[in-house]
Amino acid sequence: MKIVIADVKEGRNYQRELTDSEASTFYGKKINDKFDGALVGFDGYEFEITGGSDKQGFPMRKGIISAGRVKAIISKGPGLRKTKKGFRVKKTLRGGIISPEIIQLNVKVVKYGPKKISEIMPSKPEKESEKKKS
């Protein structure tokens, strides 16, 4: 499972791959639940779950109390590109409860720790094309 951390102070997102044991701690949690950052290696931080998507790319939706997929008639929000006023569509969505089928989990920082996230996260290695230019 990947976790995407939104840092609202800096306006940046950070992505990290979770191990199976780290990912299993999230099973059963819902969208808008808060958790301690020590679970994913960010001591002193607190995060809030904002959404995610499953293996086939179906987005999680807050109002659906299920861990599986459902077909719902929606008029706005995640999973729909609105075209006309009053337009409603039946779409397949993932419920708001985290299960092993979730491949990406989106979270935002609620409480900051002593170190910046950019210091904790390793920097990306340079691409081959960028090395040749230098």
Image (spheres, rainbow, N blue to C red):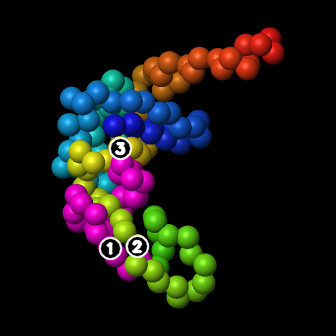
Which of the pair 59/56 is nearer the observer? 56
Dot 1 crowding, Cα within 10 Å, few <14, some 14–19, many 20+:
few
Look at the image and give the residue range highlighted in magenta.
50-74
Asked where in the image residue 59 lies, by quadrant, the reply is: bottom left
Question: How many angstroms separate mark 1 from mark 2 (CA)?
Answer: 5 Å
Tell me the number on the disc at residue 103: 3
Badge 3 amino acid: Ile
Disc 1 vs disc 2: Cβ atoms closer than 8 Å? yes
Which residue is the site of mark 2? 91
Mark 3 surroundings: few (<14), some (14-19) or many (≥20) residues within 10 A: some
Instruction: Please tell me whether mark 1 sits on a helix, a strand or a loop.
Output: strand
Rendered residue at 39%/53% (across/down): 56
Q: Is residue 53 above or below residue 5?
A: below
Q: Earlier in the sequence, mark 3 or mark 2?
A: 2
Q: CA distance from mark 1 to mark 3?
A: 20 Å
Looking at the picture, how far across and down is residue 8, in whole percent? Answer: 53, 42
The kind of residue on which mark 2 rests is: Lys
Q: Residue 21's x, y, as percent?
A: 21, 29
1 or 2: tag closer to the N-terminus:
1
Q: For the residue marked with disc 1, what is the amino acid?
A: Lys
The residue wearing badge 1 is 71
Q: Is residue 25 visible?
A: yes
Using the image, determine if residue 103 lies above or below residue 125: below
Residue 13 on the magenta segment: no
Q: Nearer the viewer, residue 115 or 55?
A: 55
Mark 3 to mark 2 CA distance (whole Å): 20 Å
Q: Secondary structure at mark 3?
A: strand
